[in-house]
Each structure stands twice: as C-alpha cells, then as structure tokens.
Amino acid sequence: MHALKNKAVFVDKDGTLIRDIPFNVDPALIELDHDVIQGLKSIQADGYLVIIISNQSGVARGYFPESDLAGVQNKIRQLFEENRLVLHGFYWCPHFPTGVITDYVLDCTCRKPKPGMIFQAADDLDIDLARSWMIGDILHDVEAGHRAGCRSILIDNGNETVWELTEDRTPDFTAENFEQAASYIVHQTIVPPCIIT
C-alpha cells in the first residue's frame, strides 16, 4: 500500500502570520501573536505541514534586495523553534509587473492570486493539495489556494477592502483570527481516497 502524501496548511505572512508592516524586512519588528502560536500548535498537532506563501513585491519595487528576505526567514524560523513549532517551507515571490528592478519585472506564475508557489511547495514536499488549506487575510490568498486545489480560509481582520467575490475568491470559512481558522481546520475530516495496490 502506498503511503499517503503530506497534508499542509499554507499561510500568508504579512497580516496573517505576523503583523502587517508594509515592506518590512527588519527582523526586530517580527513577532508572533499568542493566537497565532496557539493556532500553529493545533495545526501541527493534527499532522499538517506549515508553509509560508508570501508576495514580496518590495524586491521588484526596489525597496529592499531579495537577500534581505533571508533575515526575515531566519527570524520566523527562530520564533517557531522557540515555541516548539516547525516551519516546513518559506516561499516568496519577488516579482511585480510594474516594478523598477529589471530582473524582477515580469508577469510571473508565482505571485498570488496565481498558485505557482503552492504548486512548487507541493512538488518539493510531496503534498496532497486536496487535503490541504490556505489561510490569508485578503481574497488573493483565498483565490491562490482554490486555484491550487486547496480549501481556503479568510481571516477577516480589515486588510481586504475590495471584496470582488468570484467562485475562486469565496472563502470556505471566514475567521476572526488565526486561532479560529486553525480550530476550523483541525475539526474538519477529509476521507482519503481508496488506494488500490
């Protein structure tokens, strides 16, 4: 019998995992709120991989070099370790179609709401997208998750202001905070398909 693939929770970074400070790459300003820590613990205890999926257009806009994101990643990994959590992946898109840094100016397949980063993570980490979730604070996150084949949760914390709803942009659940989103996920049951060997 073949082993089941991994299940994952893909998490937006700014405004979802950490406080939204626009274009911040200063590790000293990065912290995890209590509700995020508790939510991550319940997700991890339920067997989900936790993977960050983040648009970082500040690179293409010339606000900071892509190398600065290594410090951001290191700080988040440190915070995870301090709270006995595991960060299984951190994927970012540095592109922006109207940026100023030529190497990063393109209409890519990875910038949310496109699902490229999720597909890449699924390939790298052997993830079953049908058993996985995307959590974010705007509808671009919801759409990216749905387009990848996941279910999606919106944390309605005021960061979404446009509310252009389509089938892909309609959340499977809307939460008030991260802990509520995590609780919803761990109380759902998806029966895996029967595998014939």
Image: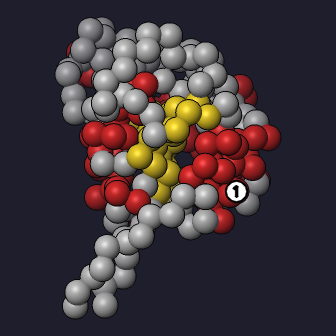
Three-letter code, disc 1:
Lys
Image quadrant of residue 113? top left
Q: Which colour scheme is used?
A: secondary structure
| Secondary structure found at label 1 | helix
Residue visible at 41% across and 46% down in the picture: 151
Q: Which of 94 and 154 is in front in this view?
A: 154
Q: Can residue 120 be seen in this view?
A: yes
Residue 85 placed where, x, y %?
Answer: 67, 58
Image quadrant of residue 186? bottom right
Residue 105 placed where, x, y %?
Answer: 24, 17
Q: Which of 48 and 69 is in front in this view?
A: 48
Q: In this view, does 4 lie above or below 12?
A: below
Q: In this view, does 33 lie to the left or right of 95?
A: right
Crowd band around label 1 with a 10 angstrom C-alpha radius: few (<14), some (14–19), many (20+): some
Q: In this view, does 16 lie to the left or right of 31?
A: left
Quadrant including the C terminus: bottom left
Residue 167 placed where, x, y %?
Answer: 31, 30
Residue visible at 30% across and 11% down in the picture: 99
Q: In this view, does 83 lie to the left or right of 6?
A: right
Residue visible at 27% across and 82% down in the picture: 195
Q: Is residue 71 visible?
A: no
Q: Nearer the viewer, residue 10 or 172?
A: 172
Image quadrant of residue 163? top left
Residue visible at 44% across and 64% down in the picture: 190
Residue 65 placed where, x, y %?
Answer: 43, 23
Number of numbered callouts drawn: 1
Q: Label 1: which residue? A: 41
Quadrant including the N terminus: bottom left
